Image (cartoon, rainbow, N blue to C red):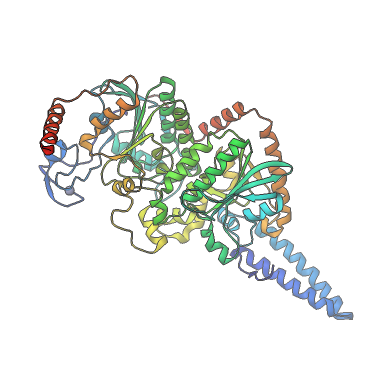
C-alpha cells in the first residue's frame, strides 16, 4: 500500500449535490472547479490531504517526509472502541498512516516544507506521531533554511486516546517552531475548518503569518463546552475565522481559490530569494486612469 | 479548622473523618470523666483508634486513580498561596498583564526560597467562596497567561529561576476568553517557556488540567505530588465523550493514565513529591516540608547547569516526549 499520496475521497458520485451549509442543490462540477467550495454560500468543503497538495504545490513537486512514523496505543486505551481499531479504521478511510502528511514541495518554484493535518483522520487530532511530524517538519525547515507552511485541520485538538503524551505534543511542537523562528525561519500557518483545543493552543497559533479559510471553526474550547459552562447561547459567528480576524488573531481570511496565489505573495515578502512581484499590465492602466481622474477632479 | 465543614470530603474519606470526630468527642468526655467511667472511655478510645488505623490503611493504602483525582481537588488541600506563605520569604506579588486586566486565577511574584531569589507563579484556586469566585476556581483567562509570561520575561532578564505551581481544572472555557485569544495566549506561553534562559521547575500540586496547566507548565523539571494528576482532558469530560455519561468519571480516570506513576512511566514527569499518609490536607506541615526539600534539591541541580546546556536539555526532553514506532515507509 502506498501511504504517501492516496487519492481516496469520501464523496459519492452524482451530478448534483446538496451544500451542507446553505442546503442549496449545487452542480458538483462547479463545486469541484471552486476547489470544493459552495458557489452559493462559499462554504468550504472538507478535502483530503492529496487535494491540498494538488491545490497548493507546483505539480509533482511534493516529496513526502517522515512517512515511517506510525502510531501505537501507548495507554492501552479502552473506550467504546479500542484506539487500535480507531486508527485502523482511519487508515482505511483515508489511505494514510496518520493525520499529518509532511514533505517538501515547491510553490511557484520556491522550495518549502509543507505539512497538512488531515481532518478526515480522527478529526485531525494530534497524537505522538502528528506532534513528531510537526516537530520534525520545523527542524527540517531549520536545517535546510526553508519556510514552513502548515495547513491545519485539527478539530480534534490533542488526541484523547494518547492522554498526557498528546497534551505534551503542544510543548514539543511549539519548542521546535520557536527554534525555527528564533533562527530567522518563517512559519506560515493556514487554518482550516476546524482547528481547536490543543492544536489551536500550540503550533496552529504560532505562525509568523496566519491565514484562515472563510467560516472555519477556530478556537480553544469547543462551542458546546462553552455554552454549557456559561449557560447562555453563543453569539452568531462565534469562533469563526471572521470572528478571529475581527478580534485580531488572524492576518487574513482567504478563499481557497486564492490561497495558492496568496501563499506565493507571502513567500515573496518573507523569502529574500523570491523575486519581487511584477507590476501587472492592468494595474498600470488603472493607475493612469486614476491620475487622469484626479486631474479632472481638480479642475 | 473552624468554619470548615469537616464532612465536606470525598466519599471514601468520610468514614475516616466520622470516626475521628467520634474519637474527639470521646476525648472531650474523657476530660470530665472520673473513676470507672474514665477507664471505660480510655479503653473505648484505644479500640476506636485501632479501628481508625486499620480503616485508614485500607482506604488510603488502596487509592484508585479517581480517588487521587478527588484528593487533588480536596477542599482542604494546600494551595499555591499556602506554599507561598510557608516556603517563600519576602514575597512581592507582581500583578497585571499591562494590556487588559489582572487575572486573580494566576498569582506571580518575586520571592526568596531558601536564600535564593526566584520568580514564583501558580494557579490560584482560592479557599473561601469569595476567593474562589475571585479567581474563577483556578480557571485562568488569557490575561492570566499574559501576566505570567510578562513576569517570566522579567525573571529571564534578572536571571531568576522560576518555580511554577500547577493547579487548575483547565483554562476557562468562556465567550470572553475566546474573544481575547485563549489559545493564542496559551500557545505563546508554551513556546516562550521552551526557550526562557533561566531554570524552570514546574510542580503540579493538585490538578494538571490540560492546556490550562501547560500554559505555565513548560520547564526543566516536571515534578508532581503523590495525589495530584495531569491529563489531556478532565475525567468527567472524557467520560462524557466516551460513554455520554460524566458520572463514569472514575472509569475515565483509569483509562486516561493520569496518576503520577503513570506519568513517570510515560516519560513526561520526572519525580513524584511524596505526601503525608492520606493526602497533603491531613498533615499540611509535612507536605510543605516535602515540597521544600524537593524544590530545593532540583533548584540546586538546575542552578549548577550552564545555560546553554540547560537549553539543550530542555529541548531534548520535550523532543523525546511521545511514543510511536518507525516502520518501513
Ligand atoms: Zn452553500
Instruction: Write the residue at 45% across / 35% down.
Output: A173
Q: Would you say B85 lies left or right of A98 here?
A: right
Looking at the image, the residue that sits furthest to the front is: A299
Q: Where does the image place residue A53, in percent across and percent down from the top left? A: 27, 29
The quarter of the displayed image where residue B125 is located: bottom right
Quadrant holding the C terminus of chain B? top left
* Any part of residue B27 in sight: yes
Q: Where does the image place residue B207, in percent across and percent down from the top left? A: 56, 52
Q: Would you say B209 lies left or right of B91 here?
A: left
Quadrant holding the N terminus of chain B? bottom right
Looking at the image, the residue that sits furthest to the right is: B35
Q: Where does the image place residue A132, in percent across and percent down from the top left? A: 44, 32
Total numbered circles = 0
Q: Where does the image place residue B91, in percent across and percent down from the top left? A: 67, 50
The quarter of the displayed image where residue B315 is located: top right
Q: Nearer the viewer, residue B43 or A222?
A: A222
Q: Would you say A270 lies left or right of B268 here?
A: left
Q: Would you say A58 lies left or right of A234 here?
A: left
Q: Nearer the viewer, residue A203 or A83?
A: A203
Instruction: Write the residue at 19% across / 39% down.
Output: A36
B291 relative to B308, above or below = below
Instruction: Write the residue at 72% across / 61% down.
Output: B54
B282 relative to A163, above or below = below
* Any part of residue A158 in sight: no
The quarter of the displayed image where residue B36 is located: bottom right
Amino acid at each position: 500500500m502506498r501511504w504517501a499520496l492516496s487519492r481516496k475521497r469520501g464523496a459519492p458520485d452524482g451530478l448534483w449535490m446538496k451544500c451542507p451549509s446553505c442546503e442549496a442543490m449545487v452542480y458538483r462540477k462547479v463545486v469541484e472547479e471552486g476547489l470544493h467550495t459552495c458557489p452559493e454560500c462559499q462554504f468550504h468543503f472538507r478535502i483530503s490531504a492529496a487535494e491540498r497538495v494538488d491545490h497548493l504545490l507546483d505539480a509533482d513537486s511534493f516529496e513526502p517526509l517522515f512517512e515511517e512514523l506510525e502510531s501505537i496505543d501507548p495507554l492501552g486505551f479502552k473506550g467504546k472502541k479500542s484506539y487500535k481499531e480507531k486508527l485502523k479504521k482511519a487508515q482505511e478511510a483515508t489511505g494514510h498512516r496518520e493525520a499529518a502528511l509532511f514533505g517538501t514541495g515547491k510553490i511557484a518554484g520556491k522550495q518549502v516544507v509543507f505539512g497538512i493535518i488531515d481532518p478526515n483522520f480522527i478529526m485531525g487530532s494530534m497524537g505522538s506521531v502528528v506532534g513528531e511530524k510537526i516537530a520534525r517538519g520545523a527542524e527540517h525547515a531549520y536545517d535546510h533554511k526553508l519556510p514552513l507552511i502548515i495547513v491545519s485541520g485539527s478539530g480534534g485538538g490533542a488526541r484523547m486516546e494518547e492522554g498526557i503524551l498528546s497534551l505534551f505534543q503542544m510543548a514539543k511542537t511549539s519548542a521546535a517552531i520557536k527554534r525555527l523562528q528564533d533562527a530567522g525561519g518563517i512559519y506560515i500557518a493556514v487554518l482550516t475548518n476546524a482547528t481547536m483545543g490543543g492544536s489551536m493552543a500550540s503550533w496552529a497559533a504560532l505562525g509568523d503569518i496566519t491565514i484562515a479559510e472563510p467560516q472555519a471553526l477556530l478556537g480553544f474550547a469547543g462551542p458546546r463546552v462553552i455554552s454549557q459552562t456559561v449557560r447562555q447561547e453563543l453569539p452568531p459567528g462565534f469562533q469563526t475565522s471572521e470572528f478571529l480576524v475581527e478580534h485580531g488573531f488572524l492576518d487574513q481570511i482567504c478563499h481557497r481559490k486564492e490561497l495558492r496565489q496568496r501563499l506565493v505573495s507571502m513567500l515573496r515578502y518573507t523569502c529574500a530569494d523570491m523575486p519581487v512581484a511584477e507590476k501587472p499590465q492592468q494595474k498600470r492602466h488603472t493607475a493612469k486612469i486614476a491620475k487622469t481622474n484626479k486631474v479632472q477632479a481638480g479642475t | 479548622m473552624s468554619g470548615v465543614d469537616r464532612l465536606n470530603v470525598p466519599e471514601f474519606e468520610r468514614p475516616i473523618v466520622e470516626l475521628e470526630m467520634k474519637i474527639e468527642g470521646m476525648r472531650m468526655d474523657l476530660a470530665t470523666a472520673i473513676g470507672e467511667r474514665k477507664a471505660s472511655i480510655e479503653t473505648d478510645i484505644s479500640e476506636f483508634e485501632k479501628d481508625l488505623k486499620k480503616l485508614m490503611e485500607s482506604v488510603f493504602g488502596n487509592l484508585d486513580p479517581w480517588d487521587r483525582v478527588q484528593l487533588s481537588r480536596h477542599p482542604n488541600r494546600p494551595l499555591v498561596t499556602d506554599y507561598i506563605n510557608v516556603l517563600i520569604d519576602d514575597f512581592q506579588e507582581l500583578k497585571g498583564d499591562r494590556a487588559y486586566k489582572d487575572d486573580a486565577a494566576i498569582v506571580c511574584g518575586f520571592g526568596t526560597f531558601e536564600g535564593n531569589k526566584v520568580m514564583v507563579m501558580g494557579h490560584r484556586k482560592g479557599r473561601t467562596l469569595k476567593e474562589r469566585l475571585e479567581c474563577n476556581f483556578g480557571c485562568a483567562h488569557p490575561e492570566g497567561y499574559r501576566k505570567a509570561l510578562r513576569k517570566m520575561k522579567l525573571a529571564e532578564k534578572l536571571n531568576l529561576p522560576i518555580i511554577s505551581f500547577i493547579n487548575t481544572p483547565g483554562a476557562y472555557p468562556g465567550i470572553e476568553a475566546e474573544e481575547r485569544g485563549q489559545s493564542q495566549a496559551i500557545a505563546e506561553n508554551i513556546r516562550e517557556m521552551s526557550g526562557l534562559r533561566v531554570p524552570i521547575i514546574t510542580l503540579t500540586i493538585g490538578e494538571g488540567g490540560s492546556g490550562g496547566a501547560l500554559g505555565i507548565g513548560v520547564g526543566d523539571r516536571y515534578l508532581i505530588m503523590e495525589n495530584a494528576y495531569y491529563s489531556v482532558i478532565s475525567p468527567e469530560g472524557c467520560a462524557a465523550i466516551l460513554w455520554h455519561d460524566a458520572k463514569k468519571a472514575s472509569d475515565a480516570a483509569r483509562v486516561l493514565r493520569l496518576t503520577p506513576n503513570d506519568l513517570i512511566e510515560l516519560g513526561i514527569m520526572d519525580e513524584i513529591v511524596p505526601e503525608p499518609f492520606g493526602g497533603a490536607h491531613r498533615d499540611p506541615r509535612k507536605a510543605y516540608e516535602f515540597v521544600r526539600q524537593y524544590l530545593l534539591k532540583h533548584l540546586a541541580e538546575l542552578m549548577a547547569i550552564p545555560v546553554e546546556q540547560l537549553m539543550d536539555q530542555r529541548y531534548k526532553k520535550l523532543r523525546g516526549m511521545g511514543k510511536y514506532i518507525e516502520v518501513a515507509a
